[in-house]
Image (cartoon, helix red, strand yellow):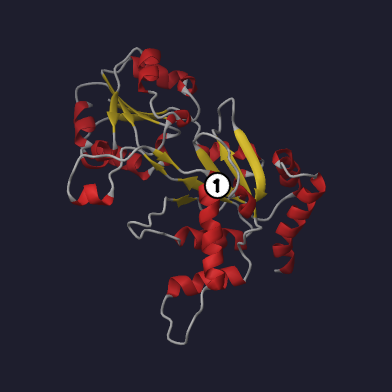
């Protein structure tokens, strides 16, 4: 039997009773250790082992994506638990694990839990008003890696009046490009993207698109499209956004401000996530007001009015 168990968001006690019983009755326990980190802690394996009374095997990206047969085959004659931070189906990798188990005729059970996909409601933006979720990854000047496609998706959501949940990058047991090429098992230190870093990326995209000069023979469709989106003011530095840190923990932090101002904020330790607001309902506005840290509430009203003006002008 293969159990795929969600651990929730914040700490070791967030596992459900059903999940805990499954873990304690398992012969082998694997912990998926690269799509997220429980409560933002880089090393929580020992805490989990003490809490469960079980030895835990860390499953990194290589094991899960390339050597998953080790996990699945063990479930043929043993009870195996595969632990996932958040909810089991928060990443396509875990869907693939289920499909592989079914192909081999191995029984499986999924134990669900809270994830950022539903806990994001804590900021007051209503869940049914969200569009496509996007991911923002670290840029690398050294590797000339600066993906911007997520910007267009945010604009698509915004043009429909929908909010956008932004999942911010984490790097755990990752190799640099050079070490990948040379096939060296040397790993980079863990990194967790902050709201400030994500916001700074967006501001840079907006400013570069605004300054981009097109000529008659220009075939750079990506930059041309970005420039058109920015000129239409669908997403600007002054768009209202929500920065969140350590959702579900006692020191959970939520900040409401413009993207430009969030680029200068410090929300503390990871994990962080972000929401770009769409059209705001009066109840959403009242809730967001709780998390605005500006000098005066009148500035919040001005911010909201300016934000919603985009939809009035449409």
Query: Residue 262 location, x and y as percent?
Result: 61, 48
* Any part of residue 66 in sight: yes
Q: Is residue 172 above or below residue 263?
A: above
- The answer to which image quadrant residue 72 occupies is top left
At which x and y percent is residue 223?
Answer: 47, 71
Q: Is residue 293 left or right of residue 93?
A: right
* Residue 125 is at least partly visible in this image: no
Please state, as top left, top right, bottom left or bottom right, where the N terminus lies in the image.
Answer: top left
Residue at the spot x=38%, y=19% of the render? 48
Say which of 146 and 120 sits in front.
146
Locate residue 215, reporting x and y percent.
47, 84
Q: Which residue is mark 1?
A: 196
Q: Give the left or right position of residue 51, taking residue 262 as reference.
A: left
SS label for mark 1: helix
Q: Residue at x 33, y 42 (%)?
A: 93
Above or below for 157 versus 83: below
Residue 313 in the image: above or below residue 216: above
Residue extending furthest bottom? 216
141 or 66: nearer the viewer: 141
10 Å crowding of disc 1: few (<14), some (14-19), many (20+):
many
- The quarter holding residue 59 reads top left
Nearer to us in this view, 169 or 284: 169
Q: Residue at x 51, y 50 (%)?
A: 198
Pick the quarter of the image with the C terminus.
bottom right
Foreground residue among 145 and 121: 145
């Amino acid at each position: 039997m293969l159990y795929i168990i969600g651990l929730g968001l914040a700490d070791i006690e967030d596992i459900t009773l059903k999940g805990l019983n499954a873990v304690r009755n398992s012969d082998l326990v694997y912990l998926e250790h690269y799509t997220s980190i429980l409560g933002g802690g880089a090393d929580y394996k020992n805490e989990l082992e003490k809490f469960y009374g079980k030895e835990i095997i860390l499953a990194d990206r290589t094991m899960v994506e390339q050597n998953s047969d080790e996990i699945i085959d063990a479930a043929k004659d043993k009870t195996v638990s595969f632990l996932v931070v958040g909810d089991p189906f928060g990443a396509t990798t875990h869907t693939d694990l289920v499909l592989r188990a079914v192909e081999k005729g191995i029984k499986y059970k999924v134990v669900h839990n809270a994830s950022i996909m539903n806990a994001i409601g804590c900021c007051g933006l209503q869940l049914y008003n969200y569009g496509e979720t996007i991911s923002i990854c670290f840029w690398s000047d050294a590797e000339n890696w600066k993906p911007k496609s997520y910007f267009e998706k945010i604009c698509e959501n915004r043009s429909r009046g929908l909010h956008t949940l932004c999942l911010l990058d984490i790097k755990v047991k990752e190799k640099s490009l050079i070490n990948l090429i040379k096939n060296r098992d040397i790993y980079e230190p863990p990194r967790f993207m902050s709201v400030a870093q994500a916001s700074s990326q967006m501001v840079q995209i907006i400013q570069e698109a605004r300054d981009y000069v097109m000529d008659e023979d220009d075939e750079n469709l990506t930059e041309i499209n970005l420039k058109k989106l920015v000129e239409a003011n669908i997403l600007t530095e002054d768009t209202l956004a929500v920065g969140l840190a350590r959702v579900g923990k006692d020191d959970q932090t939520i900040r409401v401000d413009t993207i430009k101002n969030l680029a200068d904020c410090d929300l503390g330790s990871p994990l962080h996530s972000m929401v770009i607001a769409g059209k705001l309902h009066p109840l959403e506005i009242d809730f967001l007001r709780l998390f605005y840290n500006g000098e005066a509430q009148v500035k919040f009203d001005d911010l909201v009015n300016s934000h919603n003006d985009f939809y009035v002008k449409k």
